[in-house]
Amino acid sequence: HAKETGKNRYHFFNQKLNEDIVRKMTLEIELKKAMQNDELMVHYQPKFELNSKKIIGMEALLRWNHATLGAIPPQEFIRVAEETGQILPLGEWVLRKACEDTKELHKKGYQKIAIAVNVSVRQFEEQGFVELVEQVLEETGLEAKYLELEITESIMQNVAHSTEILKGLKAIGVKTAIDDFGTGYSSLHVLKTLPIDTIKIDKSFIDQMEVITNFSIVKTIIDIGLNLNLKVIAEGIETHFQHEILIDLGCELGQGYLFSQPVSLKELENHLLLAV
Ligand code: C2E
Ligand code: MG
Ligand code: MG
Ligand code: MG
């Protein structure tokens, strides 16, 4: 009897593994088509000054709505793209599109807002990344000071190399932020030496800030950021309570569903119109 159960369990795991592999291969093939057929979209989530609720910038977030598979979460297809290397052309496309759209907004006479683009470690570490960013800025005509690249803490595993790239980006006038701060490998010692501009507190800490441990972590991150002369932004703000506490703790910038979800370029323009 025991033998049979074991065998069934083996079949179960085997089947699950097969499903995962098929899903991954499907996404890989479909993603290639999506890139060729313009099926991908970039949405924008505004960033706010918490005190005035003024829009100061926005973050580009990829969207993929597949004809039959439906909306595929970025977390899922970006992981596949990272594994297959598709993240390189994909990331370049997002960067170019985001810079183009932002330049267009500036031309239309809206306040000159900043654009943040998420960059995978794989892209960041790719030979010639700084040159690529410089080239995209030149092609789109966006001034470098309006571009910020969001990178995760995993770049700290390769401090010497990452520092070189960050210096290169700084030299061309591009800003950098550590995304999902607090969830990764940051050592304070390393953080102190990295030429970055912003830290972005991960949503998981902003959630349930009424819990004392979360509150303390958020408070500590804000204090560290301010002491290191970095800008601090909180992501995933959903309640007035969180908004108030963050202001009290001295956090100046924020982003979250309380203010706005990620929206299409058209909808973002409406936000900007209302803001003036
Ligand atoms: P992220 O960069 O940390 O982006 C924040 C995520 O939280 C976004 O999810 C956003 O829609 C969501 N979010 C923002 N405010 C709230 C809120 O108040 N409540 C809740 N529940 N969620 C909120 P999204 O768009 O699904 O993206 C997930 C992740 O996928 C991003 O996390 C980022 O790591 C990655 N990603 C998205 N677009 C790109 C891209 O163009 N390139 C790369 N490399 N990664 C991307
Ligand atoms: Mg981000
Ligand atoms: Mg984030
Ligand atoms: Mg996050």
Image (cartoon, grey):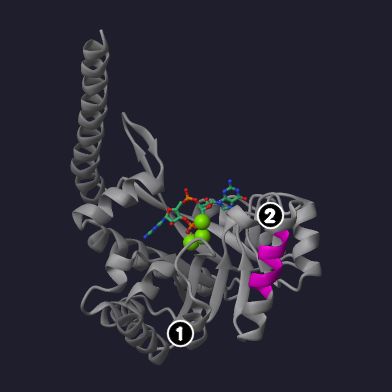
**Crowding at mark 2 (Cα within 10 Å: few <14, some 14-19, many 20+):** many
- In magenta stretch: residue 235: no
CB at mark 2 closer than 8 A to ligand 1? no
Amino acid under disc 2: Phe
Q: Earlier in the sequence, mark 2 or mark 1?
A: 1
- Relative side of 121 to 238, left or right: left
Among the 4 quarters of the image, the one containing residue 109: bottom right
Residue 259 circle label:
2
Q: Secondary structure at mark 1?
A: loop
Q: Amino acid at mark 1?
A: Leu
Seen as rendered, the residue at the extreme top is 1
Q: Position of residue 214 (x, y in %)?
A: 68, 57
Rendered residue at 59%/82% (across/down): 230
Q: Mark 1 packing: few (<14 Cα in 10 Å), some, or many (20+)?
A: some
Task: Name the quadrant of the N terminus.
Answer: top left
Left/right placement of residue 257 relative to residue 152 reads right
Quarter assignment of residue 30: top left
The CA distance from mark 2 to mark 1 is: 31 Å
Image x and y of residue 29, in percent: 18, 42
In the rendered structure, which segment of residues is drawn in magenta? 215-222
